[in-house]
């Protein structure tokens, strides 16, 4: 059951946090960071609604937002059919290859999988999408820019080969960008952002792509303004919009998620 994996959120607790003003504030801060860095436009904001009830997602939706992110296959599979079908869902958690078909089948409006880190996963997603009447699925290659053993993602030196496989060998997937996860305290080093930017340059040179056609997904609640200034085109913000999460009794098996929980606990104290 999903309730075993996710923190409990009561309706009363959900009502205490006002999503629309928080969403507006994050968008404003991202726009200001973009303007200060003389960028042409602010990054896309993916509102990460993991563990949060549909009522809060709907509040953000009613405020005009359409891009939402989820970390768990079971949660996104349960939420997506109950929410408006014009939502653009981003899957941002670690995805096991044996669950690729499940998430594709359950979420017809899945727009992006941001965490592809192997040829095997790319092939599984490609085969799953082939069985659906839908547009090609956008794919970001996850890169472990910090070199931490606990994190998923390919090493920077391997990002070109995986991007090339998606671009050339997966006919119903569209290589659309690169993604990285920050440090434990959400404050990625500038070197991490710079590393992902270098990876994009290498990928574009190898595949003859324009940089503006390759997204950089970097920046979360604690560092999205720094990431924006460093050129992020896709930021992933959750607790700052939807309120803090209660991880009491939650023991995730995903190392990425373990670090996220540790970071959020430190930020919320």
Image: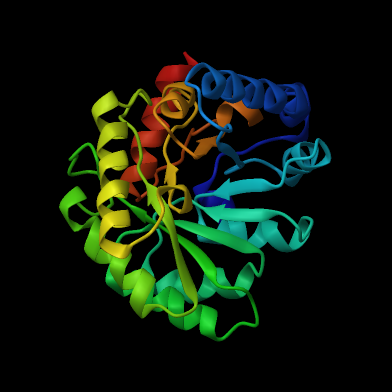
Q: Looking at the picture, how far across and down is residue 128, in whole percent? A: 50, 80
Question: Residue drawn at (31%, 29%), measured in percent from left and top?
Answer: 184
Question: Residue drawn at (50%, 22%), measured in percent from left and top?
Answer: 38
Please give left or right for residue 107 compared with residue 166 in the image. right
For the N terminus, the image quarter is: bottom right
Of 115 and 50, nearer the camera is 115
Please give left or right for residue 25 compared with residue 196 in the image. right
> How many numbered tags mark residues here?
0
Q: Is residue 176 above or below residue 36?
A: below
Of 139 and 3, nearer the camera is 139
Q: Is residue 214 above or below residue 165?
A: above
Question: Residue drawn at (54%, 45%), measured in percent from left and top?
Answer: 6
Residue 98 appears in which quarter of the rendering?
bottom left
Residue 10 appears in which quarter of the rendering?
top right
Decide if residue 204 is in sight here: yes
Q: Is residue 208 above or below residue 236?
A: below
């Amino acid at each position: 059951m999903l309730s075993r994996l996710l923190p409990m959120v009561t309706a009363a607790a959900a009502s205490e946090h006002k999503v629309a003003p928080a969403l507006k504030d994050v968008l404003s801060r991202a726009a200001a960071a973009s303007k200060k860095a003389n960028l042409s436009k602010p990054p896309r904001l993916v509102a990460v609604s993991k563990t949060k009830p549909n009522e809060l997602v709907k509040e953000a939706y009613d405020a005009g937002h359409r891009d939402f992110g989820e970390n768990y296959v079971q949660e996104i599979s349960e939420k997506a059919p109950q929410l408006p079908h014009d939502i653009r869902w981003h899957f941002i958690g670690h995805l096991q290859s044996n669950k690729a078909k499940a998430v594709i089948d359950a979420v017809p409006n899945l727009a992006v999988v941001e965490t592809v880190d192997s040829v095997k996963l790319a092939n599984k997603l490609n085969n799953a999408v082939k069985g659906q009447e839908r547009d090609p699925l956008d794919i970001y290659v996850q890169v472990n820019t910090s070199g931490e053993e606990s994190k998923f993602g390919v090493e920077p030196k391997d990002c070109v080969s995986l991007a090339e496989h998606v671009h050339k060998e997966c006919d119903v997937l569209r290589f659309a960008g690169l993604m990285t996860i920050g440090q434990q305290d959400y404050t990625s080093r500038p070197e991490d952002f710079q590393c992902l930017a270098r990876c994009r340059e290498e990928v574009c040179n190898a595949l003859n792509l324009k940089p503006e056609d390759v997204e950089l997904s970097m920046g979360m609640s604690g560092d999205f303004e720094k990431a924006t200034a460093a050129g992020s085109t896709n930021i992933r913000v959750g607790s700052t919009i939807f309120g803090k999460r209660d991880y009491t009794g939650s023991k995730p098996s995903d190392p990425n998620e373990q670090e996220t929980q540790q970071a959020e606990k430190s930020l919320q104290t």
